[in-house]
Structure formats: C-alpha cells, structure tokens
Amino acid sequence: MIRSYSRSGFLKLAGAGLAGLSLAACNSNDAASTPQASSDGLEKLTFVLDYTPNTNHTGIYVAQEKGFYANKGIDLEIVQPPEDGADALVGTGKAQLGMSYQDVMANYLGSDNPFPVTAVAAIVQHNTSGLISREGDGIDRPKGLEGKRYGTWDQDVEKAIVRSVVESDGGDWSKVELVPANSTDEVTGLKADQFDAIWCYEAWAGQNAKIQDYPVDYVAFIDIDDTFDYYTPVIIANDSFLAEQPDTVKRFLAATQKGYEYAVQNPDDAAEILVAANPEIDPALAKASQEYLSDKYVADAPQWGYIDKGRWEKFYQWMNDQQLTPVPIEASGGFTNEYLPEA
C-alpha cells in the first residue's frame, strides 16, 4: 500500500487550521513552556508532523530509534496532526515542536493575529516541488499548461506561484483551466485523468511514478525562478518554548541533526527505520524517496538545518509584492538559526 503524501492533501489540512485559530488560542502556551518529565526522568516533548509520515520525517524517526533523543535527555512523542493542523497545535502550545512550510507560515505571519511560532531548522535545503504531468502531454515546460487542466486546491499562494512560472515562460495564465485537485495521490489522479498537471514533491510523487513505471514530465519551480527556492519543509517551535527552554531546543536539534546526517549516509537503513515505525508506507517507495533525498537534506548548506536569510527574505518579499497576505510579512521574520548546533 502506498500511503498518500500529497502537497494538496497537506494544504487542505493546513488551511482549515490556519483559518480557525484565534489569537486567544495562540496565547495558551502552558504545555509548550513547561515540558513534562517522563517516568524515566527524560524531558517529554511532543513533535507534530505536517501530514502522514514520509521521508521528510525520516531523520526524526531515526533519531528516536537510534536513541539520539534519549542521549540528549529527551523523550519525544511523534504525533500526526489533528484537523486544525500542525501549525495550530504548536501555536496553541499543545505541542512544543512540529513541521510546516515557509509558504504555509506566511498565512499567519501575514495576519493581524500571527501564531507565536518560529522556524528553527530546514529539513531539506532546496525546494523540490514543481509540476508533474503525463509524459508527452506537452507540459514539459510551464507554458505547456495553456489549454490544459491544472489540479488546484485553490490556495492564493499556490495559484500565484503557478501563474508566475507560466507567465515567466511566456504563457497565458487565462488559458489554463483550473480544476479541483480531488485526489490525494498525484499519480493516481493523473492515471484517472482527473487533471493534466498538479503541484507535487519530486521526492515522493516523482519517485512514486518511477516505481510504478508510469512515465511523467516534471518541471521544478526553482529551474524557472529562484524566488521559489524557499524552505519547504521546516521545523517550527512554539515561541514561549523557545524563550523558556532554549537548552532543550538545542538538545532536540542536535539529536535531530544527527538523525538526518545518518539518513544522508545510510539511506536504505534509514528508510527501513521509517517503514518499521510506519508499516503502512510502501517500502519500495520509501527507499526510492530516501535515496533521492539523501543528498538534499544538507546539499550546499554549511550544516543540516541552516536557513539562508537572503532566500527566506526573497520569497516573502515576493509574497508582499503580490499582496498575498492581509498584512505585509516582515520578510526577515519567522525563522532563526540560533538553536542549531555550531557548525
């Protein structure tokens, strides 16, 4: 069985939570600021995933299985997100840590009542998302979307990015038909002719197509415009937790870094650890995806987790220029490298 990990599915989940969280709820940070001790004396922390378990999360499962968290005095509970999403759970203090995306964070950083949440580490150094389509349908470049059906989950930033890459390639956005992205599996949706192209992550949907021997074309957003080389996904932390427990955050990130570094060096074994913890994941897909990501976690960064200020700001400045949020985003806000281990 292939467990779904789709961009559309995640954003449908996140959108519901981002729309419903109030400022009053954000101020409820008791759980975040005062982690509990477990029965064995370890500090108990809760980490909420962004969506169903997948290879973006491998380093966390590795760090848990290999005892890296325990060695740092941490008992980590990994939970899947509720209907209102990971950002909401971290923002309200029901979890100290979680996973999100820079573009999703913009929804609340650019609001009158921003969540008390900060990105503290990048999982993958460069944006690995783009457009996937059936091979030979003529969508091997963004302009090829003219006259075709794009499967959308109707998010403003999503449509603005796709429109931008189409127009950058000389295409006419008005000639692109927008249809609902009803499938949570991109390859299944393409096979069923629900749409002609959809946003996906190459690490999952691209590898899914390969192991199914289903020929596709793929266009990476960063190959069209490096403005879209933003951080996706990232680890987020509750701001009260950061302020009150900085040493705990540093210990958590040191163990997490070790987990991802293990996945870089041992992709097959790391994939097996992920599948052992989540047996519903297709082992072949996990291994293919893990092999793809093994050189993407760190890539050209000085260390795992590092967030480049210029790239972070460039994307948020683009969002401000497009007026995609009710309130302009502080372009350099919402992230820090302060808690990462020294390189």
Image: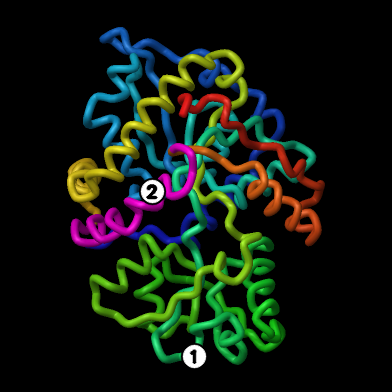
**Mark 2 Cα within 10 Å, few/some/many (few <14, many 20+)?**
many
Q: Is residue 309 left or right of residue 296?
A: right
Q: Which residues make up the magenta segment? A: 282-303
Tell me which label, 2 or 1, sits earlier in the chain: 2
Residue tagged 1: 138
Label 1 secondary element? loop
**The quarter of the displayed image where residue 133 is located:** bottom left
* Residue 338 in picture, x, y percent from top left: 57, 26
Spatial distance from mark 2 to mark 1, Cα to Cα? 30 Å
Amino acid type at image mark 1: Gly
Residue plotted at (46% across, 45% down) = 50
Amino acid type at image mark 2: Asn
Q: Is residue 302 magenta?
A: yes
**Who is closer to the viewer here, 139 or 20?**
139
Label 2 secondary element? helix
* Residue 308 in picture, x, y percent from top left: 60, 43
One can see residue 19 in this view = no
**Who is closer to the viewer here, 64 or 49?**
64
* Residue 52 in picture, x, y percent from top left: 37, 50
Residue tagged 2: 56
Residue plotted at (59% across, 29% down) = 92
What quarter of the picture does the N terminus occupy? bottom left
Question: Looking at the picture, does residue 229 appear above or below residue 93?
Answer: below
Q: Is residue 35 magenta?
A: no
